[in-house]
Image: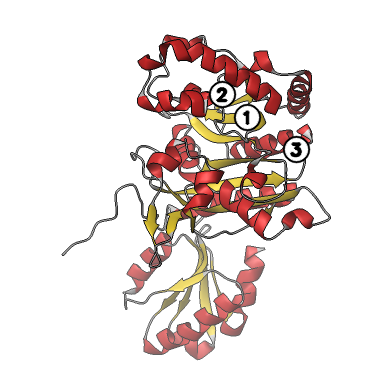
Amino acid sequence: MSFQIPRGTQDILPGEVEKWQFIEKTARDLCERYQYKEIRTPIFEHTELFARGVGESTDIVQKEMYTFLDRKGRSITLRPEGTASTVRAFVEKKLYANPSQPTKLYYIGPMFRYERPQTGRFRQFVQFGIEALGSNDPAIDAEVISLAMSLYQTLGLKSLKLVINSLGDAESRIAHREALIAHFEPRIGEFCSDCQKRLQQNPLRILDCKKDHDHELMASAPSILEYLNDESKAYFNKVQQYLTSNGIDFEVDPGLVRGLDYYNHTAFEIMSNAEGFGAITTLCGGGRYNGLAKEIGGPETPGIGFALSIERLLAALDAEGVSLPISSSIDCYLVAMGEAAKDRTVSLLFEMRKAGLKAEKDYEDKKVKAQFKAADRHQAKYVAVLGEDELVKNVISVKNMETGTQEEVPIDGVIEYLKQQRN
């Protein structure tokens, strides 16, 4: 019987996984500069957390979650995103009580959604995200957006578009909600069944519908920007001011929404304009969610964050032809001739690795010529040849593979020699 990988998942093999490691390291280094600390949460949580934390009216909760009953009949869900788990940990572990606020967290890990696989979209995917909890300052909104843009730009992407919007405060949202209901209700029968349910439940979600996005009422729907009160306008203006002062270009798009009731003020997306990237251009989405901590049992806590898919990021890099500066070379490849030399290279290889050198040797009893070919495949900077004659003289012949120069070095001194060459 043969087995195949489940649809919508992928094996990331050597040669490709180094790209992932480079991106993850770049993200971690950036978070360290911005003073975001890593959090690691369970891969599965109680289903109710996502129903409340993501929203029962969302496609994620209604159609895309991997949910099952455990042996005691409790409903468990593989996490479809990282924000709900992060805020749950923030509340449960009382991180809001720390004297230094805001609490700035980041995560990198697998998420799971049952959706149609396509370029850059998988049923198991890796998400990088950050959450800043405990500040109402519009400067933290600008910081979060700046971090996301910095990651893409640091990795070499250029065809980027940042789109922002304001969803306003609770008062502004209520006024906009009433206007949306009045706008869509007379012709709601022309919309899909999901939109018909959303009309009273959460009419803002209608604007995010993929089935009816071309309906004429979508284009003429009342804009949230028309219903912002003075406080919300001032907040949004500050965010824009800070982005401009950071030298970050953006567009204001009144149609950009976040459909959950506890989302407010800033919403944003980063898109790729690269030719050939595909119909779905969004790379990253984020926004402010001041009511989420309270929604899942914590104190009223302002928060803002974003999440992005590493798979989508890699697809954007491919679309722009960006090559990551990844090297799989090693410091030294040991070539042995004869049984005594083979025995000596076992301990010498261990000593090299213990000293911090990246080194390898042959394990297939290949001829000398084949061992040199293996050294080329490993992109070895040096090849150290040990034979019977070298053993007698207690030396090893070291060849610089870039220049072709070769010299004999005492066996006991070869590690120090290679370390000096590396420096």
Q: How many marks overall? A: 3
Pick the front one: 374 or 390 = 374
Write the residue at 77% across / 37% down.
Answer: 136
Q: Residue 153: in sight, yes or no? A: yes
C-alpha distance separating marks 1 and 2: 7 Å
Among the two numbered marks 2 and 3 on one chain, the one whose residue lies closer to the N terminus: 3
Write the residue at 22% across / 60% down.
Answer: 3
Identify residue type, mark 2: Leu
Pick the front one: 420 or 328 = 328
303 left or right of 363? right
Q: Which residue is mark 1?
A: 267
List x then y, in percent, for residue 276.
40, 27
Identify residue type, mark 3: Ile
Identify residue type, mark 1: Ala
Asked if the residue under mark 3 is in contact with the one under mark 2, i.e. CB atoms within 8 Å, the reply is: no
Write the residue at 38% across / 67% down.
Answer: 71
Residues packed near mark 1 inside 10 Å, few (<14), some (14 to 19) or many (20 plus): many
Q: Which residue is mark 3?
A: 140
Q: Which residue is mark 2?
A: 256
338 left or right of 108? left
Instruction: Check the image and tell me how it is coloured.
Output: secondary structure
Secondary element under disc 3, as helix, strand or loop, is helix
Pick the front one: 402 or 97 = 97
Among the two numbered marks 1 and 2 on one chain, the one whose residue lies closer to the N terminus: 2
71 left or right of 329? left
Secondary element under disc 1, as helix, strand or loop, is strand
Asked if the residue under mark 2 is in contact with the one under mark 1, i.e. CB atoms within 8 Å, the reply is: yes
Among the two numbered marks 1 and 3 on one chain, the one whose residue lies closer to the N terminus: 3
C-alpha distance separating marks 2 and 3: 20 Å
